[in-house]
Amino acid sequence: MSEFIKAMKFRHACKLFDDKRRISKKEIVAVLEAGRLSPSSFGLEPWHFLVIESAKVKKALEEAFFGQPQVATSSHLVILLSRKAKFFKQTSEYLDEAFGRIEKDIKAVESGKRELISFLENDLEADVTSWAKMQAYIAGANMMTAAAALGIDSCPLEGFNAKKLKAALAENIPEFDKKSYKIALAIAFGYRAGEQTDQIRWSLEKIVTFVK
Ligand SMILES: Cc1cc2nc3c(=O)[nH]c(=O)nc-3n(C[C@H](O)[C@H](O)[C@H](O)COP(=O)(O)O)c2cc1C
């Protein structure tokens, strides 16, 4: 079995972590690096990752996650934020900076922005907020697989009350820039306290159609 498939089989939505075990700085940085290196639409990387180590802050967020025990027992709780829709406008300085990394010529930057905005306005089925969140999900998926490759467990957490979580983040984390970001997804990382649950999946035949 390839190392990659081994990691995919190791990863499961861990429901309870061993709260005595901590992920080392080096390993959590490696996990975050997998997020950073992830692909994103137009290469915009419209995300920010809040990495919560503080037991006190995790406890303060627990209620917004309906008391799910992964939150407080995790070693690191990562909140994946995504840029608000207001940043994807022709006059956006954020877009100037983002496209400016790729295109050196101002005309090319302007035309990159126009192309993006036309795509978002005319071709995308989702709304812009959801589109930005989708990008963060890709980074999150890569973080979880990278963690699994290092023997680190994780649980993606969409089960939260967005309003309560936003308020709790604003109250407990001064660095949380609520004017710029929406909460996309949270991922708890740590080491499993119990047994892994079975992986239940549709068969490849059921979910794949080869078109020859
Ligand atoms: C976007 C997303 C959100 C999820 N939210 C939660 C959650 O809030 N709580 C939870 O226990 N599991 C959550 N899960 C885990 C799924 O229930 C789990 O991945 C699925 O049942 C398959 O199980 P496995 O990952 O253990 O193979 C979430 C998964 C995804 C992809």
Image (cartoon, grey):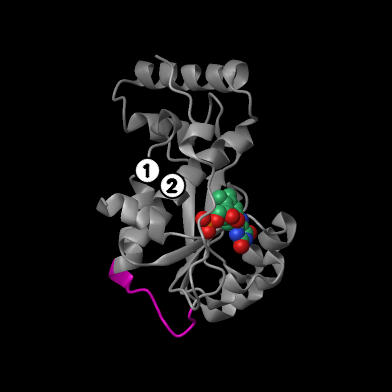
| Residue 66 seen in this snapshot | yes
Closer to us: 117 or 91: 117
For the residues bearing labels 1 and 2, Cβ distance under 8 angstroms: yes
Closer to us: 176 or 184: 184
Where residue 42 appears, x then y in whole percent? 42, 28
Q: Is mark 2 within 8 Å of ligand 1?
A: no
Identify the mark at residue 139; answer none if there is no mark. 2
Identify the mark at residue 113; answer none if there is no mark. none
Q: Residue at x 37, y 60 (%)?
A: 148
Identify the mark at residue 38; answer none if there is no mark. 1
Provide the major secondary structure of the magenta segment: loop
Q: Quadrant of the rendered structure where residue 146 is? A: bottom left
> From what the image shows, is residue 109 above or below residue 132?
above
Give the amino acid type for the residue marked by disc 1 in the picture.
Answer: Ser
Residue 164 part of the magenta segment: no
Give the image quadrant in which the ligand numbered 1 is located. bottom right
Mark earlier in primary sequence (1, 2): 1
